[in-house]
Amino acid sequence: MSLLAIRARSILSLNGESPARGERLFAPLKKIDNAVLLVREGLVLDVLPWKEADLPAGAQVRDVGPVCLAPAVVNAHCHIQLSCLKGRTLWGKGFSAWLSSMIPLLHEADAHTAGLAVQDACEDIASSGTLHVGDVGGSLPGRLSMVHAACCATGLGVTHFCEWFGFGPPFADTQGPWPPRCREEAEADMALAACCAPAGHALYSTGPDILQAARRYCAQHGRIFSFHLAESSEETELLTDGTGPLYQCYAGKVLPGAWRAPGKRPVALAADLGLLGPGSLAVHGVHLNADETGMLADSGTALCLCPRSNSNLGVGLPPVGDLLESGTLLCLGTDGLTSNTDLDVRQEAVFLREHLDVPPEALVRMLTVNGAAAVGLPQPAGSLSPGSPARFCILPEALTY
Ligand SMILES: [Zn+2]
């Protein structure tokens, strides 16, 4: 097998980098200018300055031009199965208005239409230089297998967070806290099952017993437990007071008749239920006060930020400065096409660079080594280290330096 030499204006290999929190997020990254990535049989041999590369006869040279290459990125939170709803939901009016616009559409698309949209979405994700996606799956029949097949066909690694939505009926303990549809699909496909983790939607939409059982199952089986947390002020209002537009949206439909507000803010409630800690991946974290960012950091919970989705829906933006300093393990996700224009997670980093002046070193780490750790990939995933798969992305100009 011949040697492939990929030459670029610069390369960030992140070789030797581990997941970073707090001040370590901002440490300089080693960048090699006029660099070459040497690849054999799909694996990284080395990243070197071009002038030091001693290429053997027969080596294939591919010059990708005036770009900066970085390791392929991780999109830690997506909803690929809902891709057919792109452009059809209401944005800019808050969370409940968006949710109310989406619910009537959920069962509208036939399998063929949904499948084409899923295929397009996975092709777009893969072509943006994404290594792995953490995808919320399983709410609709057949979609888990559909998304899995499309990920495999496009070379995308995937973790399916099999989301239990609703408060019951109680699951059979012997079968684990899997949504029934996911269990059926996973039982029929061992390869699919290996990529699945039981999950919950959120504190206000999934029964606390189910959330706790899913978290326990994940801890016992070495899987990542993921759930939406503190996405909107409406969520906080519902959980603390049992009022507001989200309550109006869910009362009598999702919330059981005997439901009472727990009287706690989201992070405190998640902590009480035992849902925080290493191995948990919370998503959004928009409505966090200073105490809560500290609690998340101290607990070891990873947090996936989806700032473009938050901005599009009009729910606010996370306290990114506090989170960066807090020591929380931070990564990035696009959320789905019902709340975003595309599924290129690099654009979340560009958004944070341009709107909140987050340094590129932190953003590159969040996209790569941190994202890999947050979804449970072993090191050196998220880097171009010798022996690792030669999967890379082109870093957007806004993130280069
Ligand atoms: Zn989501």
Image (cartoon, grey):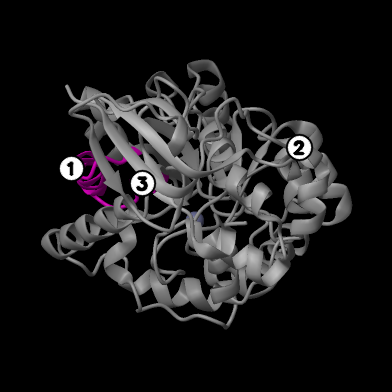
Image quadrant containing the N terminus: top left
Residue type at mark 1?
Ala
Dot 3 corresponds to which residue?
137
Gap between marks 2 and 3 measured at Cα: 33 Å
At numbered mark 3, what does the secondary structure look like: helix, strand or loop?
Answer: strand
Image quadrant containing the C terminus: bottom right
Dot 2 corresponds to which residue?
24
What's the magenta region? 134-157
| Neighbourhood count class around disc 1 (C-alpha, 10 Å): few under 14, some 14–19, many 20 upward | few
Q: Is residue 149 magenta?
A: yes
Residue nearest the observer in this picture, 3 or 81: 3
Q: Residue furthest right?
A: 291
Percent position (x, y) of residue 21? 73, 37
Q: Earlier in the sequence, mark 1 or mark 2?
A: 2
Displayed quadrant of residue 155: top left
Dot 1 corresponds to which residue?
153
